Image (spheres, rainbow, N blue to C red):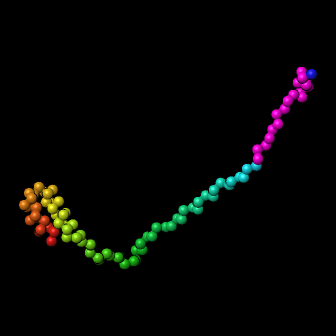
Amino acid sequence: MASIALLMGHGAQAQYVLPAPSQVVPPPSSPPPPKIEAPKVPRLDAPPSYNDRPLPRNSFSDRVSKCLDDAAAAGLGPADRGTYARSCAN
C-alpha cells in the first residue's frame, strides 16, 4: 500500500514554516555634507597690518642653559663656558 501511495505522489511532505517577521531597521542616514567656505582673500586696497609687538623673551635660566649648550657645542672648556654664558645670557 505504501508503494501505491508513493507512486501516486502522496508521499510524506515537509511542512514549510515562514520565519517570524522581524523588525526591519532602516539604514542610518548619511551625515550632512561638509560646509564649504571660500577662503578669506586680502583686499588690495586694505592697509597692511603689522605685528609691532616684540617676541616674548625666554627666562634667564633658559637663556643661560642655551648659552651653556652652545658653548659646549662650540668645544669650549668648562672654565670658558661660564664666561661665555655670562656674556651671552645678558
Residue 28, given in percent of the width and then of the height, sits at: 63, 56
The answer, for residue 15, to whether it is visible in the render is yes
Residue 31, given in percent of the width and then of the height, sits at: 59, 60
Q: Residue furthest left?
A: 79
Quadrant hosting residue 27: bottom right
Quadrant hosting residue 32: bottom right
Q: Residue furthest bottom?
A: 47
What residue appears at the point 40 percent right and 77 percent down from the top-left corner?
A: 45
- Left or right, 53 with reference to 61: right
In this view, the residue in front, 3 or 48, is: 3
- Left or right, 89 with reference to 3: left
- Compared with 72, 90 (above or below) is below
What residue appears at the point 29 percent right and 76 percent down from the top-left corner?
A: 53
- Left or right, 17 with reference to 48: right
- Left or right, 55 with reference to 32: left
What residue appears at the point 85 percent right and 30 percent down from the top-left corner?
A: 12
Residue 8, given in percent of the width and then of the height, sits at: 91, 25
Quarter of the image where the C terminus is located: bottom left
Quarter of the image where the N terminus is located: top right
Q: Please, what is the dominant secondary structure of the magenta stretch?
A: loop
User: What segment carries the magenta color?
Assistant: 2-20
Q: Magenta stretch: residue 90 in it?
A: no
What residue appears at the point 21 percent right and 66 percent down from the top-left corner?
A: 62
The answer, for residue 7, to whether it is visible in the render is no
User: Exactly how many numbered labels are in the figure?
Assistant: 0
In this view, the residue in front, 90 or 8, is: 8
Q: Residue furthest front?
A: 1
Residue 33, given in percent of the width and then of the height, sits at: 57, 61
